[in-house]
Amino acid sequence: MSAKPGPLITRTTSGAGHIAVALAHWAGGHTVSEEELLRRIIKARADAHAEAVDEHQREARRAHKKATKLRRIASEDGGLVPAAQSDLNRAEHEARRHEAALEALGDFEIRDVDPGQIRHRRKRIAALRCTALTLPVAGVVVGSWLLDGVVLLVSTLGAVSVCWARGNTPFELTVRPVPAELLADSALLVLEPAEEEEGEAEPIEADDLGAWRTTLRRFVEHAVAQAHLERKGGVLAIDLLQRLQASGLHLDKAPDAFPAVLRSADIPVKKISVDGTKAFGVQYTELTSTLGRLPQLPVHLVPDLTQQPGESKPLPQASV
């Protein structure tokens, strides 16, 4: 008959088992929830998108500033030397390129995250933690080999003492809550799919597009509504830009780059014909479809329909 292990050995063995389970839980990355991993992935995407937008906006402003300076010199001096004209063409090309890049980037959209990405990120965390666990063991082995065997003896006694101290009390294997700073940074990024499917899609308010986009959308809506009263199908982008620049707005925009600016404000732009001129512009029917309603004029621009028969009154002019 074999003798039963003593209480000391039983307690130490039980503590070692609890510690091993806890280390495996931690090293496998199971303390990090899928919600936290999802938030990290989406936040990384949002940060990368914001960085790209900032870079293109910065480069576009720099190119527009250089082009505006060269145009001013040309108007003052009656022209540019070939080298300066090449610089102007290059600056305009760079401005168009960055405007196109901004249009392609658009606003940040939250897309579904592949579950494989979450598993991959958890495996990366597990690999780092397992590496961290091997470092103390490697240190004990190297110390015992290079210094003295006492290092191994002391380390073993320390591990046994920790196991005995843990005893029969298991660890509570929990998932770490999402850090407060991460929750604050990404709270607006993560959407609940159930709420999106159950609720009806709400229209995007113009104020959500930013101040300059709101102003531009309102101005275009007024101009297109006025053109419709004049029995025109729409307004050319170059005409819109000329009216805006006459009011002191968008002075740094070139005519060929302005359609991209309109698209970035969610204004539909296509090739249209107005008074026999075919160019990019905003069509009344397309704008109506985008707005989900008829383009409207403000009260002070609505024509007076109470005038007496035979009287004529000019149509009001659109304003910013």
Image: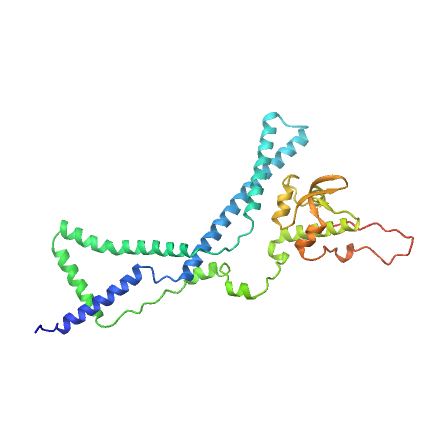
x, y percent for residue 92: 60, 36
For the point 84% across and 57% down, the residue is 305
Figure check: 305 above or below 279: below
Total of numbered circles in the picture? 0
* Left or right, 163 with reference to 271: left
For the point 18% across and 71% down, the residue is 11
For the point 62% across and 45% down, the residue is 261
Which residue is situated farthest in the left direction here?
A: 1
Which residue is situated farthest in the right direction here?
A: 310
Figure check: 137 above or below 57: below
Residue 291, located in which quarter of the rendered image?
A: bottom right
Q: Pick the residue in front: 87 or 72.
A: 87
* Left or right, 271 with reference to 34: right
Which residue is situated farthest in the front direction here?
A: 1
x, y percent for residue 74: 65, 30
Residue 132, located in which quarter of the rendered image?
A: bottom left
Q: Pick the residue in front: 165 or 203.
A: 203
Figure check: 58 above or below 129: above
Figure check: 91 above or below 173: above
Q: Pick the residue in front: 76 or 26.
A: 26
* Left or right, 47 with reference to 3: right
x, y percent for residue 316: 80, 51
The N terminus lies in quadrant: bottom left
Residue 127, located in which quarter of the rendered image?
A: bottom left
* Left or right, 193 with reference to 316: left
x, y percent for residue 234: 73, 47
* Colouring: rainbow
